[in-house]
């Protein structure tokens, strides 16, 4: 069985104004931010499923029809859809963040419940008891921070800048975790000594577009400008541009973020697929709550060489991106006008048309879907995709 599915918009202030409305064929409101489009069954913003002419939250549908998830999914993940699919338009940098392991999430969620911290409290860190590994596929050129650089690269980056040379000396006597802890707990006067000379020296080069996007100085000044950060009230997270890998993904490429790896989306548009969780531990560049003790407990300070997920090959019409995730997998299906694909799914699936128009048929249902429209496919369904115009779709499912 296949059902029409409608997602939920999120209007966070870092979002763009046009991309998501254009993708979804919605009229954009003036001065409104369109940051994310959620497709899934997270309790804070469940998608709406159309069943026999009625519209109901996907959470309600799955409570009433748990077999739609599939036997394997229910054995491993219980009666909940284990993943959440999103479209993001990152017009301004997101907070530096990381996500807990399953065990850390269960402990943190229980502890905050015992303390009586309301789920809507801005100082609440754990919104649920699940982990949140996530993958993303770029829909445009995309820039992000991802994990700590190799230590020798951090040394080189710091030593090139006179005001950061004392940090390079400090790193020579400490492991990365102790070093990061000291940076994140630095006093404002210390942040000024480290960062203000760079800001003053590079501001004119930034204004003249002379700084390349792989230069941390560019992102330091860009983030201050985009996020309205005053030189008189600097954010310790700004130093992470000198510590973390700055990653450039081309359209179609992706990356996987495992538990504990610090990261931040800086600019671009992407598809994001993650375990169904909203647990975010922030490490700066945000007006939201930054829980430093929890951050230092959860952060993974391994030196990381970013592993880029290759784009779907043009000659492979049905392609599944490779990640180590157990909670989700993302399939890319390409079609021309008149091209047909016959597929079967062994878990519940969320299908979204990213470009073009198709007919989507199962034994009992037929839907016509165009760009931006989605469907929910129950486990065990055999279905057929017929391209009505050239394009591609994505399917979120279990591996």
Image (cartoon, rainbow, N blue to C red):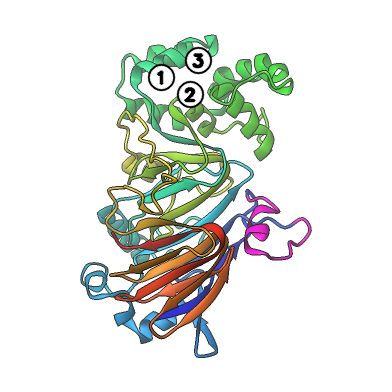
Residue 154: numbered disc:
1
Q: Is residue 70 left or right of residue 14?
A: left
- Distance (Cα) linking label 1 and label 2: 7 Å
The residue under label 3 is 164
Residue 54, position in %: x, y?
Answer: 54, 89
Question: As rendered, which of 389 and 265 lies closer to the eye?
Answer: 389
Measured Cα–Cα span from mark 2 to mark 3: 9 Å
Query: At which x and y percent is residue 236?
Result: 52, 32
Disc assigned to residue 336: none
Q: Nearer the viewer, mark 1 or mark 3?
A: 1
Residue at coordinates 39% horizontally, 18% vertically from top-left? 153
Is the Cβ of the residue at disc 2 closer than 8 Å to that at disc 3? yes
Give the CA distance from mark 1 to mark 3. 11 Å
Residue 342 in sight here? yes
Residue underneath mark 2 = 242
124 or 20: which is nearer to us? 20
Mark 1 / mark 2, whichever is N-terminal: 1
The part of the chain drawn in magenta is 15-31
Q: Nearer the viewer, residue 187 or 93?
A: 93
Crowdedness of circle 1 by 10 Å Cα count: few (<14), some, many (20+)? some
| Mark 1 / mark 3, whichever is N-terminal | 1
Residue 166 drawn at (x, y percent): 45, 12
Q: Helix or strand or loop: what does disc 2 sit on?
A: helix
In the image, 229 versus 217, the foreground residue is 217
Q: Earlier in the sequence, mark 2 or mark 3?
A: 3
The answer to whether marks 1 and 2 mark residues whose Cβ atoms lie closer than 8 Å is yes
39 in magenta: no
């Amino acid at each position: 069985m296949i059902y029409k599915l409608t997602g939920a918009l999120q209007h966070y202030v870092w979002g763009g104004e046009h991309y998501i409305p254009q993708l979804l064929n919605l009229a954009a409101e003036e001065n409104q931010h369109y940051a994310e489009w959620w497709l899934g069954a997270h309790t804070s913003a469940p998608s709406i499923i159309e069943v026999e002419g009625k519209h109901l939250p996907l959470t309600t549908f799955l409570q009433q029809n748990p077999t739609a998830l599939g036997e394997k999914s229910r054995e491993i993940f219980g009666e909940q859809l284990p993943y959440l699919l999103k479209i993001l338009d990152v017009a301004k940098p997101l907070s530096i963040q990381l996500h807990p392991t399953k065990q850390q999430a269960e402990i943190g969620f229980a502890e905050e419940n015992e303390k009586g911290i309301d789920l809507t409290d801005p100082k609440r860190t754990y919104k649920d008891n699940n982990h949140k590994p996530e993958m993303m596929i770029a829909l445009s050129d995309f820039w992000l921070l991802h994990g700590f650089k190799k230590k020798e690269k951090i040394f080189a980056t710091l030593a090139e800048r006179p005001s950061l040379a004392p940090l390079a000396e400090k790193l020579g006597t400490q492991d990365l975790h102790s070093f990061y802890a000291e940076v994140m707990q630095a006093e404002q006067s210390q942040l000024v000594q480290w960062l203000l000379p760079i800001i003053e020296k590079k501001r004119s080069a930034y204004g003249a577009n002379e700084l390349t996007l792989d230069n941390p100085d560019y992102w330091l000044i860009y983030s201050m400008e985009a996020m309205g950060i005053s030189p008189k009230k600097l954010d310790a997270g700004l130093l992470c541009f000198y510590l973390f890998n700055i990653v450039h993904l081309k359209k179609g490429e992706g990356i996987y973020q495992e538990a504990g790896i610090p990261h931040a989306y800086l600019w671009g548009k992407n598809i994001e697929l993650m375990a169904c969780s909203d647990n975010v531990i922030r490490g700066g560049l945000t007006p939201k709550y930054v829980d430093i003790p929890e951050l230092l407990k959860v952060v993974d300070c391994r030196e990381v060489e970013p592993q880029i997920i290759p784009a779907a090959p043009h000659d492979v019409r049905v392609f599944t991106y490779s990640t180590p995730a157990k909670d989700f997998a993302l399939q890319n299906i390409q079609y021309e006008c008149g091209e047909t694909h016959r597929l079967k799914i062994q878990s519940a699936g969320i299908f979204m048309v990213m470009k073009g128009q198709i007919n989507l048929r199962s034994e009992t249902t037929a839907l016509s879907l165009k760009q931006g429209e989605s469907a929910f496919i129950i486990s065990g369904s055999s279905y057929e995709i017929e391209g009505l115009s050239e394009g591609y779709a994505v399917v979120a499912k279990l591996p």
